[in-house]
Image (cartoon, helix red, strand yellow):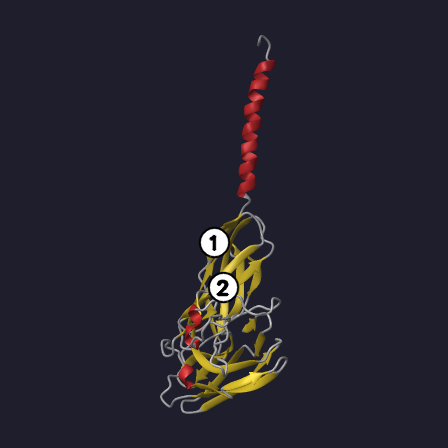
Amino acid sequence: MWFRLSICSGLCAAILLCAPTAAPAADLAQATARQNVAPEYALTVSPVRIELAASPGEQASTFVSVRNSGALPVTLQGAAADFLAQGEVGEPRFVPAGQSEWSMSRWVSSEPARFTLKPGEGRRVEVKIAVPRDAEPGGHYSAELFSTAPSDTGQTAVVAQVGTLLLLTVDGDVIHGGTAAMTGPRVVQKGPLPLGVRFQNVGTIHVEPKGEVMITRLWGAPVEAVGIEAQNVLPASARLLRATWAGPGIGAYLVRAEMTFGSPARRIVSPERLVIVFPWGQVLMGIVLLALAIGLARPLSAAREPGCR
């Protein structure tokens, strides 16, 4: 997942905040791009997601690259913000520091914390995470955000932010746990058939479940196995993982998800779900047309009988 600011028309913004005054990083959840922004700016950051591990009391560090692809120089300020997974699509929702059980924004700093980029210039920034000695084992999450800083004249520029997601595993007694359930339509007229697997992470660490949707006849005869897209799922959140069966024929099928996640790998199997593929719309239309044909045929037949006037 790339966090990208694009004030140019040809780029897309994954995190974009436009406002007449500077806003704290924790307020990004409520920020939207409501105002017109000058097309001379374009910022990118890479990588967009970094996974690290450390023990309590240790310091973890990494580097990110920030580039100004716009036509004007820009001064950026680094700041950390906690985030949670929003909905079942995994979009990050930024929250105030300490509000999340998995918070670590107060552990994060960047060097340099403030810097200026000329047009076309990029810079490597070191991101440091100082893990407290009493840190809970498991996953902790924040983002390092880079936002345009106020000018030296005291005037506040349009605020725009890009950032990198930080996923930290604190060593210790980590719990892996998850459940899976099939979702999607129960009756379809034809393919392709969209299949969904709702994975609920009940552990204390983010996981990336992988697996297949197994499709069988009602009597158990295997039909096909369809791969499930792999996505990160944060603790205490659910994510909808998608798959598509391209060529179902008419009939009744049972579908179930077989998945593995965690290290060492744990295997789970979802309950089976009945799916019926039947072109009921075409059948109904055929019945209606047949009824109309019969209804019209009877008067015509009666009119041809002898003695009928």
Instruction: Reply above or below: 285 against 85.
Output: above
Would residue 221 be visible to someone looking at this image?
no
Q: Position of residue 164 (x, y in %)?
A: 51, 78
For residue 221, which quarter of the picture? bottom right
Q: Residue at x 50, y 69 (%)?
A: 259
What amino acid does circle 2 point to? Ala
Q: Quadrant of the C terminus?
A: top right
Would residue 181 be visible to someone looking at this image?
yes
Q: Are marks 1 and 2 in contact (CB under 8 Å)?
A: no
Q: Residue at x 47, y 60 (%)?
A: 182
- Relative to residue 309, is residue 239 drawn left or right? left
- The residue labelled by disc 1 is 274
Mark 1 element type: strand
- The residue labelled by disc 2 is 257
Instruction: Reply above or below: 223 against 163.
Output: above
Density class for disc 1 (Cα within 10 Å; few <14, some 14-19, many ≥20) is some
How many angstroms separate mark 1 from mark 2 (CA)? Answer: 13 Å
Whichever of callouts 1 and 2 sits on the residue coming sooner in the sequence is 2
Q: Position of residue 57 (x, y in %)?
A: 41, 91
Q: Position of residue 214 (x, y in %)?
A: 53, 61
Q: Position of residue 76 (x, y in %)?
A: 52, 81
Instruction: Reply above or below: 285 against 199.
Output: above
